[in-house]
Structure formats: C-alpha cells, structure tokens
Image: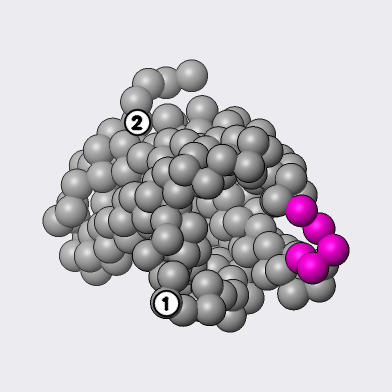
Amino acid sequence: MSTTEDAPAPTSVHVVGTSIADPAPLGLAAFALTTFLLGSTSAGWANNTSGLDWLGYAFAYGGLVQLLAGMWEFRNRNVFGSTAFSTYGGFWIGLGLWVLLSHASTTDKDLAWIFLAFAIFNTYMLIFSTQLNMAVFGVFLTLELTEIFVFIGNFSGNTTIGKVGGYLAVITALVAWYTSAAGVINGMKGRAVLPVGKPLFDL
C-alpha cells in the first residue's frame, strides 16, 4: 500500500539484502473479488444462482491468497498490511468453514456476531488507515459500513438492511479494486499514475 500520492513505491519496509514485490495489490484484489461475489448475493442480484458462487473463492482467493499476501507483508515488515491481509484472509476461510460445517444448525444471529466481531477489529484499522492514504482509508471506511449494516440486519432479521449491506459490499469491492489497480500500475511505473491521495492527518 502506497503511503502518499507522491510516493508510489511500495510502503513496505524491505529487509536489507532482499527484494520482493509489494503484495498489497494482490491482497486487495483477492479481497475485492470475494467481497464482490458475496455482496452481489446479499444484494439479491444472484437470486437465479445457488447463492454460493463466492464460497470456493472464499477459500482459494479471498482466503488463501490474501493470507499469503499477509505473510509476505510480514516479510516486508509492514505491520499494517500483514495484520489486515492475514486477518481478512482468515475471515474468508472462517466464513467458508462456517457455511460448510455449521450453517444448518445455526441462525442469522451467529452471522451477526461474526460481523460484529470483525467490525470491532475494522474500527481501529480504519483509524490507523488514516496514516496511509485516501484509497486505503476508503477501503476500510466502506468495509466498516458494510459490516455494520450486515450485523444489524442479521440481529434484527431485517432483510432490507441486509440488502443495503450487500450494496455496500459491492462498493467496498470497487474501492479495493481501484486501490489494487493503483498499486499495480504505480509500482510498475515508479510514479503516481493512479492517485491514491495522502494521509488524512498525523497521529
């Protein structure tokens, strides 16, 4: 994740003597696609399908690939990226396992508790994302709103609120895709081709 619009190089601090690509664009792309698929289902746009088109990608792309991106961020000594990607990689794997192993014996309130827990995590990551750039902040802001609407909708049993959560998930995915694309082209060119903005303020 690039820290400023004027500094398109990866924000990760590389270990001396090593050189690996910035894993953030990959992690963001994996997060975006899986979020888009689940959001489309929650919004009711995939009613003519099984509604589980996202499940395989929760394990393979949003889960495994994003978790790997988090591990590579550890290699880059990027504490924010490693925490974010590893956590949300685990989120997708855990959500997939929840659907496969226990959904038949659980209720929507179980899903509400899951999203509430991740909203708590996302809240402090949202605050800390203000130290990076506007694009990353946008990802965590839209994700925060998504998680809030999903857990409220599931606690209350209100399907309309749940659909709003689906719409917000799609918006979150689009913001994450943009941030990923910016990381790819800015890293390729070594300059800010796609702007990501500056940090909101300094803590």
Question: Which SS class for mark 2?
Answer: loop
In the image shown, does 194 or 17 lie closer to the viewer? Answer: 194
Other residues around mark 1 within 10 Å, as few (<14) / some (14–19) / many (≥20) = few
Disc 2 marks a residue whose amino acid type is Pro
Which residue is at 76% across, 53% downward? 107
Question: Which SS class for mark 1?
Answer: loop
Numbered tag placed on residue 199 in the rendering:
2
Residue 91 appears in the figure: yes
Which residue is at 21% across, 42% downward? 6
Q: Position of residue 148 (x, y in %)?
A: 55, 36
Which residue is at 31% across, 37% downward? 134
Numbered tag placed on residue 27 in the rendering:
none
Q: Position of residue 197 (x, y in %)?
A: 25, 38
Q: Earlier in the sequence, mark 2 or mark 1?
A: 1
Determine the image quadrant of residue 91: bottom right
Q: Is residue 58 left or right of residue 188?
A: right
- Which segment did they paint magenta? 103-107
In the image shown, does 164 or 194 lie closer to the viewer? Answer: 164
Magenta highlight: main SS: helix
Disc 1 marks a residue whose amino acid type is Asn
Asked if residue 155 is positioned above or below residue 63 in the image, the reply reads: above
Could you give the CA–CA distance between mark 2 and mark 1, rounded to whole angstroms?
A: 42 Å
Other residues around mark 2 within 10 Å, as few (<14) / some (14–19) / many (≥20) = some
Determine the image quadrant of residue 48: bottom left
Q: Position of residue 46 (x, y in %)?
A: 42, 70
Q: Position of residue 110 (x, y in %)?
A: 76, 49
Q: Is residue 97 left or right of residue 133?
A: right
Nearer the viewer's eye, disc 2 or disc 1? 1
Numbered tag placed on residue 48 in the rendering:
1
What residue occupies the far left of the structure in this picture?
A: 193
